[in-house]
């Protein structure tokens, strides 16, 4: 497993590593300790990805505002939320 800190990893590489971790955990056969290590690493990667996506969303909003293209808040959330109600 990579020991690279999440701050030093590119977003796309983090997604690749996260997919690999999920596959390994789903496959099974790992010791409890290895499973916990991979789970912990996966959670760190998820947090990093969410943080970077939030930052990208804010940058997009800023660029749109600066160019006069942003007249209302863009909903980046899934539209399926209304279906759950």
Image (cartoon, helix red, strand yellow):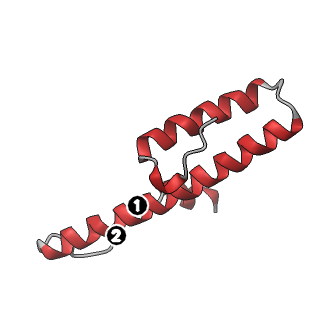
Which residue is pictured at 41% across the width and 46% down the height?
10
Report the front residue among 30 and 71: 30
Relative to 26, is 2 above or below? Answer: below
Q: Tell me where residue 43 appears, x and y as whole percent.
A: 66, 52
Q: Tell me where residue 68 appears, x and y as whole percent.
A: 12, 74
Which residue is pictured at 59% across the width and 38% down the height?
2
Q: Dividing the image into 4 quarters, which one contains the C terminus? A: bottom right
Relative to 9, is 61 above or below? Answer: below
User: How many numbered discs?
Assistant: 2
Which residue is pictured at 58% across the width and 52% down the height?
46
Residue 46 relative to residue 68: left or right:
right
Which label sits on residue 58? 2
Q: Residue furthest left?
A: 67
- Front: mark 2 or 1: 2
Which label sits on residue 76? 1
Which residue is pictured at 28% across the width and 70% down the height?
61
Sequence-earlier tag: 2 or 1: 2
Q: Dividing the image into 4 quarters, which one contains the N terminus? A: top right
Disc 1 on helix, strand or loop?
loop
């Amino acid at each position: 497993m990579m020991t690279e800190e999440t701050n030093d990893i590119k977003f796309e590489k983090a997604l690749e590593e996260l997919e690999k971790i999920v596959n390994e955990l789903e496959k099974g056969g790992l010791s409890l300790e290895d499973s916990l290590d991979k789970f912990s690493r996966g959670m760190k990667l998820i947090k990093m990805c969410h943080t970077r996506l939030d930052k990208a969303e804010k940058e997009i909003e800023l660029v749109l505002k600066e160019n006069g293209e942003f007249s209302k808040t863009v909903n980046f959330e899934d539209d399926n939320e209304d279906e759950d109600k």
